[in-house]
Image (cartoon, rainbow, N blue to C red):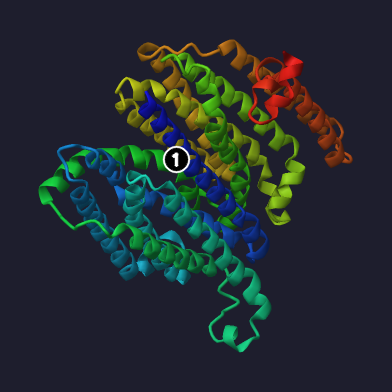
Amino acid sequence: MADSKKDMQTLAKDTVIYGTSSIIGKFLNWLLVPLYTYVLKSQADYGIVTNLYAWTALLLVILTYGMETGFFRFANRQDKNPSQVYSTIITCIGFTSLLFAVVCCCFAHPIASSLGYADHSEFIALLAVVVAMDAFASIPFAYLRYKNRPILFAALKLLFVALNIVLNLFFLVLCPKIQDMSIISAWYNPDYGVGYVFVSNIIATTIQTLCLLIFTTREKYSFSFPLLGQILRYSLPLLVLGVAGIMNQTLDRILFPFLYQGEDVQTQLGIYGACFKVAMVMMMFTQAFRYAYEPFVFSKHKDKQSVETYADGMKYYLIFSYLILLGMVFYLDLLKFIIAPSYWSGLKIVPIVLWAYIFQGIYFNLSFWYKLTDRTQWGAWLSLIGLAITFVVQLVFVPRIGYMASAASGLVCYFTIMLISYFIGKKYLPVPYDLKTIGGYTLLTLLLLAIFYAVRYLVPTHAMSISMATGTLLLVVYSVVMFKYDFPLSALPVVGKFFKAKNS
C-alpha cells in the first residue's frame, strides 16, 4: 500500500512537470504571434509562416510513423532489452529523417514551386532539416520519459522555446535597429524578413538536439533487424491514426492556397492564421484545466472504480470551457490588440474556432469508451470520418467564402465525430453523463451570447465600451450560476480555506 501511494505521488509530480512545461511552452510560443503580426511587413508574410508550419506538423507525424509509441510498448516488455529497443528505433528514425532532409534539400526548388514559394526554396530546405531533427529528437525525448527524468525533459523543451523567442527578437526587432553596425551589416539582410523566422527555428532546434544527445547517448548500442520488424508491425498502423488526427487540425491551412481563388491568397491565409492563433487561448486554458482541476474531480471518486468519474470530468470540462468561451467573446475588443489592426478583419472566425475546440475537447473526453474497452479501431475510424468531413467542407466552400469555410470545417468535423462517438459509446461503455446540467449550461451560454450580440447590434455607437460593460455583466451572471451550483468555493484549491467556515 505504501509503495502504491508513493508511485501515485511520483506519477502526480511527473504529470505536473510534463503538463506545466507543455502549457508554458505553448503559451510562450503563442506570444510570437503578436510579434509576427506587428513586425512582419505584410499579412502575406505571416501567411507563409501559417502554411509552412502546417506542413511541418503533418510531416513530423509521418516521419515518426508511430515509433514513439512503439518505443514505450517494447521497452517495457520483459522479453526485450530496453537498450536494444532504443538503439534500433533511433537508428531507424535517424536514417529516415536524414534521407528526408537530403531529398528535400536536393529538390527544394521544385517542391517550393509546387507550393507557390519558387522565390524562396531555401525555406523548404530549412524546414526540412528542422522537421528531420524534430522527428529524430522524438525518440530521445521518449527515452527521457521512460527513464523518469521529467525535469530534464521539461528543461530541454523550454530551452527550445526560449532560444526561439530570443532569436526571433534578435533578428526581427534588434537587428533592424542596429543594422548599420559593421558586425551586423556584414550578414544581415533587412529584406529577408520572414526568412529569419525559419532561421531562428533551425538554430534553436539544432542547439536543443545537441543538448538532448548529450544526455541520451549513454546506452550500449545494439541494433536488431528482427526487433525492428516487430516494432514496425506494431507502430505503422498507428501512422494512419496519427496522420488522420493531425490533418483534422492542419488541413485547413494546407489546402487553403490550393482552393482559394483570389490573388491575395497568402494575405488571406495570414489573416486567418493570426486570428486562429488568438482562439488557441481556449486550447491552452482547457489543457491547464485538465492538469489543474482533474485531480480534484477524480478525488471525488478515489475510493471507487466508477464511470461516474468520467461523467464528472465531462461536466466540469464543459462548465470551465464555456466560461473561457464567454470571456474571450465578450472581451474580444481587447484581445484583438494581440494582433496588428491589419488582421482584425478575420476576428469573426474566433467564436467559430472556440466552439470547434470545445467540441474537440468533448470528443477527447468521450474517447474513454473505446480506450477502456480495447476498441481503439474506432478511434481510427472516427478520425478518418472527421478528415473526410473536413476535406469536403473545404473543397466545396473555401472557393466560395474563403477562410470562413476553413474555420467552419473544424467545427463541423468535431461536432459530427463527437455525436457519433457519444452514441456508439453508449453501447459499449454507458457513462451517466449529467445531460441535464450540461444542457442547462449550454442553453445559458447560448442565451448570454445571444443577448451580447443583440446589444452590439442594437447599440452600434460606442460599441466597445457598451459591449465590454454588457459582457462583464453577463460573465458575472454565468459565474454566479457556476459557483452557486457546481463550483462551491470551499472546494477550490488554495482559496477554498477562506470559504469553508462560511459554507459550513
Q: Is residue 217 visible?
A: yes
Residue 153 is situated, as x and y percent measured from the top left of the image, at: 42, 51
Left or right? Give the position of 217 relative to 131.
left
Query: Which residue occupies the foreground of this view, 500 or 433?
Result: 500
For label 1, the SS is: helix
Q: Residues within 10 Å of mark 1 (few under 14, many from 20)?
A: some
Residue 434 is situated, as x and y percent measured from the top left of the image, at: 55, 12
- In the rendered image of this protein, does residue 44 appear above or below residue 384? below
Residue 444 is situated, as x and y percent measured from the top left of the image, at: 70, 19
> Which residue extends farthest bottom?
182
Residue 292 is situated, as x and y percent measured from the top left of the image, at: 56, 33
Query: What residue is shown at x 28% (from left), y 41% (from top)?
Result: 72
- In the rendered image of this protein, does residue 388 appear above or below residue 258? above
> Which residue extends farthest front?
2
Residue ID for mark 1: 14
The three-letter code of the residue at mark 1 reads Asp
Q: Quadrant of residue 37?
A: bottom right
Q: Is residue 263 visible?
A: no
Query: What residue is shown at x 35% (from left), y 42% (from top)?
Result: 243
Left or right? Give the position of 365 relative to 265.
left
Query: Which residue occupies the foreground of this view, 196 or 138?
Result: 138
Query: What residue is shown at x 60% (from left), y 37% (from top)?
Result: 285
- In the rendered image of this protein, does residue 296 appear above or below residue 338? above
**Quadrant of the image containing the C terminus:** top right
Left or right? Give the position of 59 relative to 483.
left
> Which residue extends farthest left?
226
Left or right? Give the position of 355 relative to 467.
left
Query: Which residue occupies the foreground of this view, 440 or 208?
Result: 208
**Quadrant of the image containing the N terminus:** top left
Query: Which residue occupies the foreground of this view, 96 or 270?
Result: 96
